[in-house]
Amino acid sequence: MPDRTPFSVNWLVTHIHARHVARAVRACASGRLLDVGCGSRPFMDLLEANSERSLGIEIDTRRYARRSASAEGMVACSGTEEPGHLPDAWASGLQLPFIDASFDTAVSFQVLEHVPQPARMLAEIARVLKPGGVLVLTAPHIWGIHEEPHDYYRFTPYGLRYLCETVGLQVHSVMPLAGFWVTIGARFTHYLAQFEKLYLHPVTRPLMALIQLLCLGLDRLHRVDSDAWNHLLVARKPSRSPRHK
């Protein structure tokens, strides 16, 4: 089910994530843009509207390749998953198929936790960014295991900053995407979802809507950022390489 209403399991985090991503992209993106781990490209329209050319790469052909137009239609009609768009290339973030300094902007949303060598992926992004180029990235801090077995890490804001700085990027900001109340509300809706195996949708879905709306309001009243479910990082490749003595 698309996460478009509070009756959907992931509505709360999807709503918050999309809002912050849109704000960061509009403020930072320009020129040639690379989307690393683009999946079904849910942000394609946003990225294309804020760049000269947007390219998306993805490694998971099993999950995201569309085998036929008829299969796509079946997925769309089932309401279980939006069909999305194909990437421009099937490639790994650990070995980007681009020459050095070929992009003005790079983005990567909810991908880093699924990469066995996150520092290597960030080093590859730094390599293909032009001097002065910008990275916009989101990654989880508190979240359950998902897309197993390829779920390797969770990141504090200090961990994200450290990883970027070790590959030569200058971190502009690392901000939490909501705090404790959103985290607990989102996790509780996932707990409720397990009862839908017993066909309890008429009970679980109204509860999900109530919990998500209530927790969104409570989070605005009292933020506890140390329990954030996710962070958004903005970093820049230095315009000039450091001088060596």
Image (cartoon, grey):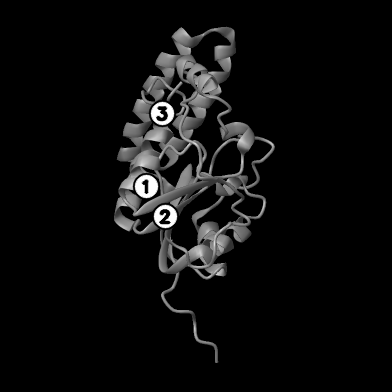
- The residue drawn where x is 35% and y is 33% is 216
Closest to the observer, 221 or 242: 242
Query: Viewer-proximal residue, 89 or 151?
Result: 89
Q: Residue reaching furthest right?
A: 149
Which residue matches tag 2?
33
Q: How many marks?
A: 3
Q: Residues within 10 Å of mark 3 (few under 14, many from 20)?
A: many
Alpha carbon distance from label 3 to label 1: 21 Å
Task: Tell me: residue 244, above or below residue 87.
Answer: below
Q: CA distance from mark 2 to mark 3?
A: 27 Å
State if disc 2 and disc 1 touch (CB < 8 Å).
yes
In the rendering, which numbered label is found on residue 47? Answer: 1
Q: Looking at the image, is mark 3 or mark 1 nearer the viewer? A: 1
Q: Which residue is mark 3?
A: 11
Sooner in the amino-acid sequence: mark 2 or mark 3: 3
**Mark whose residue sits in front, 2 or 3:** 2
Q: Which amino acid is tagged 2?
A: Leu
